[in-house]
Image (cartoon, rainbow, N blue to C red):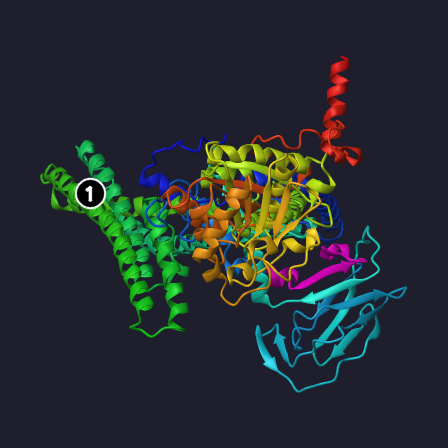
Amino acid sequence: MIPEKDAKVERNDIQKERFGSFALFDIEHFLSRVIKNWYWFVFMLFTGYAIAWIYGKYYAQNIYASNLSLSVSNNTASYFTPNQSINFIWGQGGNQDGIYLKKMLLSRSHNEFLVKELDLFVNYSTKGAIKSTYLDKDDSPVFVQIDKNHYQQINYPFTLIPKGGNAYEVVLPEEGESTNVYSYESEGFHEIKPYERPENKIIRVGEWYTAPNLRFRLVQNPVKPKIKLTNIIINLTSVNQTVNDIVSTIGVEFDKEINTIMIITKKGYNLNSTVNFLNKSVSELQKKRLADKMTVDKNTELYLRGNLNTVRKKLDSSANVLNYLKTSEKLYDIKDRDEKSLTEIKDLEARKADLESKISSLNSIKNSLDTQNFNKMISTSAAGFQDGLFTASVSELKALYEKRRELATIYTPNSEPMLEINRQINETRLGSSDILRNYYTQYYTEINKINRKVAEANANLSSYPEKERRYLDAERGYNMIEATYNSLLGRQNETQMKLATNQSDITVIDPAKNVGQPPIAPNVKAAKMGIIAGLLLLPLLFIVVGELLDNKIRNIKELLNATRIPLLGVIGNNNNENMLTVLEQPKSSVSEAFRGIRANVRFLSGENEKSKVILVTSSIGGEGKTYVSINLASVLGLSDKKTILLGMDLRKPKIFGDFKINNQYGISNYLTGEVSVDQIINKTKIPNLDVATSGPIPPNPSELLMSERNVKFIEELKGRYDFIIIDSPPVGLVADSFELMKYSDANIYVVRHEYTEKYMLKMITEKYHNGEIEHLGLVYNDYNTKQGYGYGYGYGYGYGYGYGYFDEDKNYKEPLLIRIRNKVKAIFDKK
């Protein structure tokens, strides 16, 4: 809406600061650009789909995973396999035996054994037209057996090409030979003398291929592969690299319901390889687990056997003494024996003998602990107890000693890592010693109690004669040694039974198996969607960046919200070769727009003055200031109003060309006093329209426009004409127009669509709202009629298209989206 000339709106300082400030991002224009560039999105969609299809078909390297589940029993304990009941050593609760096994499965020593046992440092693959495929060893018709005593170049893939029969051609890479080669024996690198690239060679199965950087032979696969290969690519890697690669692909989890069940996962590029590795890994772990358990039981059985031999000798000696007393002293039938006391003493001394045997076993365990001789450690069952804390502490102490030996090869004795490992060893050793001390205290306390009870029972036997008491003492000694022997014999039988029935406490529930599992990665579907989405984002990104960097005026609504300056009209794109649109195309939509501007100008200046001076300006050249001046003057002249068009842009004269007027004399000549007013006024083919051109470019245009003679010139013209249209200089370049505005009744500021910079409107907006400029209105020029003049605001200057209202309608063609909308609407209207 155009405000009245005298309408005043009070504005506070905060509102004034907002005037001239545009939004950083124009969402409406952004969406219009997206719709306008729809074909780029379609192109990117098809391109993305094509790339994604090629990627999935030829380049995506599938990763497979196989699983193996096993159960870990918790009814046995070993110094090398910690028991279930330990919580403090590993810093975790729950299934400590399973955690220990997890560490074993991921340990370097275990996986290094598998790498060497299965020759996993020899990698097999094959290559098609584009894509390489990793093979399992059993997929190859031949195996590569390397000479470990010969230096080998690793990461140097060579190819075996079948030549029929048992012959294969060895094809080496075109380049990449190195003198830095690897020794599988020492697991280190060595330098050799420079050499020329070895020639390709055909060898047969069983024949050695020898080169400075390679030596191997081919071994026939006993199982015929299902796949016929045209090439086999062999790549050797170091043991360390292979171990690290394998460990990084192994995962171990525990069942959430039963924590003694482990699920082991192996990832790899070939499913059969992962299956074979898992089954072999667990099989070897079972063997090691059983061997560890049997080591302790064998030590215990050996220890008990030695003690039994010693006690047996004592038992035989004691039996001889007892028999001698029976036969020589005739004491085998003592009258009035106190059987109750004798039985009590026998039971007490049998218990004492058992305790002393346990203390002896404790001494053996303590000695092994103090001397760090863990391989000779006997089972705690020989000492009469099962203590998970002690078992785990010994296992941890053994691991800490081994770690200290490794660190000693790297660090000095007083270094921080060595001091820390020593602290851990002392802490763990103190813990295990405290546990043993508790059992010593417990056993000695029981022995002292037994001794007191035996002393009380002996008091009842004091009445016997000395000879009979000597027999009873001999009998008690025999019984005590016999009790010790029986106790040791029972433990030996128990240990031998364990040795005979020993089996690994690892039970495989579900072995790894190839059941045609699909690959777990890459997620080809997600990758395809990512590729398509990424390509679709490219044009969107370009548009967004373009919007952020674009500072042009493109939206009428945003322009009015930012400036709060009345809009007089919107001018469409001029397709004419000259600027006389109103004269040459009077029925065009552009001409109608100028008539609308003519009607709206009166709201700026009012109707109470006889003559009106209308000044037309803009920010910079090229925005259509002269074009608007010419056509506004033409519209006023055609409406029977005496009008004169003044070309006061003295620095850049333009008007004379379109009206075909000689610019030899003009306003600049008049202002310098060279000619009179009548000499510079030119008639046009419109009877009521005169034109005064700028004339030659003067050296001092600003001084001339601000001179008193120019003021009198305008006042004189007011008496002759109804309207005076001034084509003034751009305000963004010079200040001349601001001076001329003092004498104008209405001021038109031209903004060109997608040409005028937003920041250029800051000055004129501030001056308008500060009251320095009055009677100001905007004309929006060169708007794209295909978008509709009212786009984003509501002005309907393009409403006639397609209805035969304007001249342009005969060539008008509705946009594609509009046609589609109309057809859809027609279909629904029929229903």
**Which residue ends up furthest to the bottom in the rendered image?**
193
User: Given the image, on which type of amino acid does mark 1 rest?
Assistant: Glu
Is 116 covered by the magenta stretch? yes
Please tell me whether mark 1 sits on a helix, a strand or a loop. helix
Instruction: Give the number of marks.
Output: 1
Looking at the rendered image, the quarter that the C terminus falls into is top right
Residue 189 vs residue 14, the one in the foreground: 14
158 above or below 460? below
Residue at position x 59%, y 45% from top? 644
Closer to us: 375 or 640: 640
Rendered view: 258 above or below 78: above
Residue at 17%, 47% (x, y): give it: 470
Q: Residue furthest right?
A: 164
Image location of residue 232, percent across then percent down: 78, 62
Residue beneath label 1, please?
446
Q: Residue 6 appears in which quarter of the rendering?
A: top left
Instruction: Tell me which residue sits at (45%, 39%) in the image.
Output: 775
Instruction: Tell me which segment is drawn in magenta.
Output: 114-140
Instruction: Assess whether residue 804 is covered by the magenta stretch.
Output: no
In the rendered image, is residue 329 in sight?
no
User: Residue 236 at x, y = what percent?
Assistant: 67, 67
Residue 101 placement, left or right of 68: left
